Image (cartoon, grey):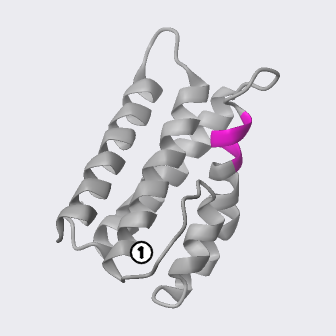
């Protein structure tokens, strides 16, 4: 694994740990932060996969765009589009006043993150 991919993975794992830790918080859980870091985790893993396959990508936080860029190498990921759209919206929607993530939003974000992290790590040849 080259240094750039390793750095994407390291940053993705940081977001995975942050989302997981915040989700496990017994007091004052921040559902907005859970959703944001779940999206960030998957975003960085997708960018690591694109880097591995030498597929260029622009600076974007839209997971649908990133998954679609992966489709030539991972066509089955087409099935991820709906969940990637949800994670993208969760990360952006709850960053501003007027909207807040619920417990259910955070739970869905964590489930999506965990599910897709496993396959992304497998794609990169990383242990589960």
Q: Which residue is disc 1 drawn over?
A: 50
Secondary structure at badge 1 equals helix
Q: Which residue is drawn at 18% across and 70% down?
A: 2
Q: Residue at x 55, y 20 (%)?
A: 30
Q: Which residue is drawn at 58% across and 58% down?
A: 60
The stretch in magenta equals 89-93
Image quarter hosting the C terminus: bottom left
| 52 is higher (above) or lower (below) than 12 | below
**Looking at this view, is 57 or 46 the one in front?**
57
114 vs 105, left or right, is left
| 125 is higher (above) or lower (below) than 54 | above
**Looking at this view, is 3 or 105 the one in front?**
3
Number of numbered discs visible in the structure rendering: 1
**Looking at this view, is 119 or 9 the one in front?**
9
**Looking at this view, is 96 or 37 the one in front?**
96
Residue placed furthest toward the top? 27
Image location (x, y in percent) of residue 84 = 62, 60
Image quarter hosting the N terminus: bottom left
| 17 is higher (above) or lower (below) than 84 | above
6 vs 118, left or right, is left
Residue placed furthest toward the right? 98
Chief SS of the magenta region = helix
Image location (x, y in percent) of residue 75 = 54, 88
């Amino acid at each position: 694994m080259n240094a750039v991919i390793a750095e994407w993975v390291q940053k993705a794992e940081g977001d995975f740990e942050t989302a997981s830790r915040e989700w496990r918080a017994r007091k004052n859980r921040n559902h907005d932060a859970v959703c944001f870091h779940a999206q960030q985790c998957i975003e960085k893993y997708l960018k690591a996969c694109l880097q591995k396959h030498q597929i260029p990508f622009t600076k974007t936080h839209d997971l649908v765009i990133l998954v679609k860029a992966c489709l030539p190498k991972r066509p089955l990921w087409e099935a991820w589009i709906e969940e990637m759209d949800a994670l993208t919206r969760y990360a952006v929607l709850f960053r501003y006043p007027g909207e807040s993530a619920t417990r259910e939003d955070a739970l869905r974000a964590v489930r999506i993150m965990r599910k897709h992290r496993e396959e992304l790590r497998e794609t990169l040849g990383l242990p589960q």
